[in-house]
Structures are given as C-alpha cells and as structure tokens.
Amino acid sequence: ATVASLLRSECADSKLVVLDKGRGVGGRMSTSRSVKANSFPVDLGAQYISITETYKEKHRRFHEELISAGILTPLRSEIEGNRSRDPSVSHHVAPQGVSSIVKHFLNQSEAELHTCEQVTQVNVTGNTVEVVSEGGNTYQCGSLVLTMPVPQILQLKGTIADIIDSKPDVKKKLEMVSYSSRFAVGLFYNPGTKIGYTWGGKYIPEDSCIRFVAIENIKRNLNNPKLGPSVVVHTNVPFGMEHLEQDKNVMVPTILQHLRDVLPELPEPDEIKGHKWRFSQVHKAYEDSPGCVVLNENPLILLAGDAFSHSTMDGCIQSAISTKEALLKVHSTKSNI
C-alpha cells in the first residue's frame, strides 16, 4: 500500500494495480468485524504502533500525516506486563482499526484494487510480466513488486521460479527467512455487556498458550453505548508453532479454556472468530535487511515487505521507500513505469 502511494506521488500518470489474496486489505494489519454481535471490531494482527527514536525523524512525514488525519492517536490505556519502558518510544493506536492505515495509503495511491486474488504464477515474456491468480485471472504489467511472505514467493510457479534458481545466492538468502506463527481469536459482545477489567492490553508471560489479550474499545479509547465491547487474544509463538497444522476452529476451544483460566471474570462472548497466522512476524529477515531485492531488471521484478526490513509499521515504510528508489533507479524515465 505504501509503495503504491509513493509511486503515485512520483508517477502521476502510471497505472497502478494492487492484488490482495484477502477479502479485504490489511494482511497482518487486518481488522475484523462481527457478523452477529453488535460490537466494536477487533485487530486480529498488529495491536498498536510503536515509533522508535530511530524513525521519529526519518519517517516524520508519514507519522504526522497519519496522526493529523486521525488514523493514529496516542495509546492512552494501560498495557499491563509491557516490558518496553523506553521513554523515547511512543505508542499509538488506530481508532478505526489498524487496517485503516493500509486503506489510507491505498486510497492515496488511487490504485486499481483486486481482492480475493492470490497470485500463484509469474511469467516473464519479453519486456512484460504476466501475473496469474488462483482463480485464473491474468494481469500484465511492466514492473512487479511482490510483498507476500517469502515462503509464498518461493512457491510461485512460472518463469519466476527459473529466475530465482538462476540466482543461487539470492535463493539461499530467501530460504533462510523465517517467521513466527500464532493463533488469534476475536471475542464479540452485544451492547450492555460489562467487562470487569480496566486495562487496554495485557501480556500473559506465564501461560503455555496465551501471550496477549486486548480489550479493543479500551485499547482504542472508544466509547459508544450502541456497540458492545470486543476482545482479541493472541497465542504465544511456541503454542502456534506446535499446533501450526491444526485447523483454527479446532484450536479455538483450547485457547478459550486457557483464556478462562487466566481471566476468569471475562464473560462468555456472543460471537467468536478464530484466525491462524502462519506468517505472523519475521523471525529472521533477509540478510542485511536491504529493504528490497531486485530479482529481475528487465522487466523489473522487486521483492519487498517486512521480510526485507523488520516487522513494524516503520519497517514496512522503510521497505516501501527502498522499493520506490530501486524502481526509479532501474527505470531511466518515469513514463516507462
């Protein structure tokens, strides 16, 4: 989303197309709404945005833009058990859900968006890249940026597999990228339900299953009597890795039992949504974290995303900046993009 936004500002007349395999945009910054309960939505992925001293100046314009638009606001609720007490780090939440950050940059890009389009094949023919989705749709472009998790890049069919094989050093570094895995469960409550806790989030270090719990409306400092509260639960990484091949719905009862043990006063929800993050956070990034990798120059294929930097919003922004610079460097004239 940020790459598309940056390219739009540089190349006003270029056609930008974004393919997302999800039903909605966001990926690991997704916000999920209830189907049956009339409650606040939950952030199933990223919980809050931490801005370190390193990026306060470097990405100031991005931060100020998001804050001035009301997309980010200061985190005011208590996060119990938070080990990071560095006063130079500022924490923010997204009142409309973290997916609103992604939507903001996509809206800026004016890109043509196609959801439910999982890319399965990439072919290079002359100066053109052909992208094929699982549904059989084909897209042709002059330049391609892939930001999917690295293991999914390595699974792509078509001539891109041959290109990767022809670069053994790059392939080896891609194969060394690893991710943590975890489950997330959203709990939705109807209006009038009382939650007997006052914190916005809580880290649970002592449980064998649960790592973090957030009360969404408190975390995001929201108060609407017409909406019920909502809670999101994240498992720890060892539990996620141990049960990675289990169906998310099979694991939900086990996770909820652990939740009852650690938070016995939490009421029973009116609706439950489970989610499995096979690729949660980058555990080991691409060597030297270059921001992006030029896989092919003509036509241009770039690999980008947090695997080439680090798993924070600023890591994604840094990768986007590197990608834009690499793209403009390869193309001698902007009209070629």
Image (cartoon, grey):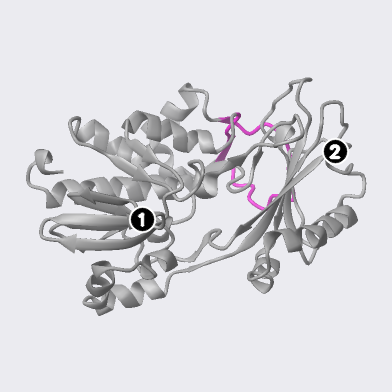
Q: Using the image, determine if residue 50 lies above or below residue 234.
A: above
166 displayed left or right of 18: left
Task: Identify the image quadrant of residue 47.
Answer: top right
Q: Earlier in the sequence, mark 1 or mark 2?
A: 1
Instruction: Pinpoint residue 196: horizontal percent, then vertical percent.
Output: 89, 37
Viewed as shown, does residue 159 lie left or right of 275?
Answer: left
Q: Amino acid at mark 1?
A: Gly
Image: magenta residue range = 73-95
Residue designated by label 2:
197
Q: In the structure shown, which secondary structural element does the residue marked by tag 2 occupy?
A: loop
Work out whether 332 lies above or below 158.
above
Q: Quadrant of the N terminus?
A: top left
Three-letter amino acid code at the position of disc 2: Tyr
Residue 194 drawn at (x, y percent)? 88, 32
Residue 39 inside the magenta-drawn segment: no
In this view, the mark in front (1 or 2): 1
Q: Residue at x 49, y 45 (%)?
A: 52
Question: Would you name the residue on which mark 1 appears?
Answer: 136
Residue 155 percent across, percent down from the top left:
39, 70
The residue depicted at 23 percent of the width and 75 percent of the height is 167
Residue furthest left as drawn: 332
Image quarter of the C terminus: top left
Q: Quadrant of residue 39?
A: top right
Secondary structure under tag 1 reads: loop
Label 2 Cα neighbours within 10 Å, binned few <14 / some 14-19 / many ≥20: few
Residues 325 and 132: in front is: 132
Can you say whether 61 is above or below 208 in the image? above
Residues packed near mark 1 inside 10 Å, few (<14), some (14 to 19) or many (20 plus): few
